[in-house]
Amino acid sequence: MSKRVTRAERRRFLGAAATAGAALAIPSFVPGAVLGRDGATPPNERIVLGGIGIGNRGTYDLGCFLPQSDVQFVAVCDVKAARREAIKNMADKTYGNRDCATYQDMRELLGRSDIDAVLIATGPNWHALASILAAKAGKDIYCEKPCTKTIAESLALANVMRRTGRVFQAGTQRRNLPHFAFACELARTGRLGKLHTVYAHPAGMSTRSSGWAAAQPEPPREEIDWDMYLGPAAWRPFNRSLLDGFNFEKGGGLVGGGVLEWGSHCVDLCQWANNSDDAPAVEYQPPKDGRLEAFYGNGVKLVIRNDGWLPLGSCPVRFEGDEGWIEAGDSGKMVISSPALLAGRKVAEIGGYPATFHVRDFLDCVKSRGKPLANADVACYSHITCHAANIAIFLNRAVRLDPKTCVFDGDEQANRLRSEALRDPWRV
């Protein structure tokens, strides 16, 4: 049973006790919003939310959470003082108070028993470990992508969520957009005939290490906690340029690259279309002529390519079967081989890949204890396909992955890239 439910039951008990003594009480006016009238959610039914690492993308995500009537955002943790203050001001302005607490160490925020769920939008070097710490602290998690840096982290993340029973939603919000969901449905249900090829768009197909910038004077810890910013990532000297943009660990460590960055969206949709939410692709070829090809256990080919797409916006996917095909992108539009495949349905065109529907899916599952569309098992195997593709790119040769163990067949060099050492004292 979640802590939120326990608190709600306790509050209902106290409410009943108060009612029993109402004859002795002085009559007073109680605003309808407190009682849940006029569409408002009573406080004891709200999901109490905290935020960890709320920068540019996290601020957008939080903007999707704050308007939800059943959410109360109460605390933010960030290693940067300026971000802590900015998010506190954002929350306090929403609620008309100064109640949002600030923390520099996520362990203090996770130690609060009143917090039900957390939004994690740190850099990717923290995503998996912060999610695992949150789950062990009894919190449900909405985590931005990419959720993991390695195959080993992917497996550990899914395992911890299963053991703790926490609700986890990866920030792959396209699963909750109508046209992408419809395209996957056509492929999944056989409306395209026997599926033979799925196409994903990466941000690029290069792999690289994180690099090493020249040392600069480290700011006071109260301003920027550099050690906590690095977290489990390998140590390097402070350089302010590493704080700019998404994160210096973008896409992962040694074999980080664009396949993971966009692939955590596009490959994820391909796996959904192929009914492969529970297993990664098996065989991976190195890129040739701008295309990387991989194969699932059922024989379906995954093509990761930068070019050759219809003008349908960013993050396009395409699914081809013996009897038809469909392609969709972030414009909210899709192109289909035959109008008959619509079967009279009108699919909403929602462009710009908003996260509102994805956030709502997460919140509904926090209440029901169901699995959201981008749960930890889904994220685990779509990320593993991306990691394995990156390893094929890095080694510039074919690799084969056992879909059950997620170990490369007889390939010591590839298997060394399944994981990476974490800096003390952090452990997955």
Image (tube, helix red, strand yellow):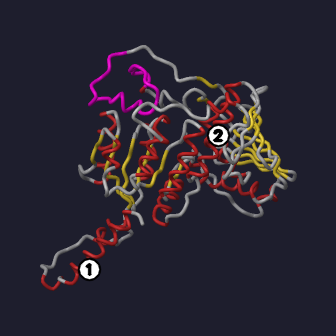
Three-letter code for the amino acid on which mark 2 is drawn? Cys
- Which residues lie in the magenta part? 216-242
Residue 14: image location, x then y, percent: 25, 74
Q: Which residue is mark 1?
A: 16
- Please give the label number shown on residue 302: none
Describe residue 209's horizontal placement relative to residue 283 as left or right. Answer: left
Closer to the chain start, of discs 1 and 2, is 1
Q: Quadrant of the N terminus?
A: bottom left
Determine the residue located farthest toward the top in the rendered image.
Answer: 214
Assess disc 1: are there few (<14), some (14-19) or many (≥20) residues with their C-alpha within 10 Å of its C-alpha.
few
Residue beneath the point at 34% across and 55% down: 115
Residue at 26% across / 76% down in the picture?
Answer: 15
Q: Which residue is mark 2?
A: 315
Disc 1 residue type? Answer: Ala
- Residue 227 appears left or right of 25: right
Image position of 80 with respect to 382: above or below = above
Query: Would you place residue 177 above or below residue 53 in this image?
Result: below
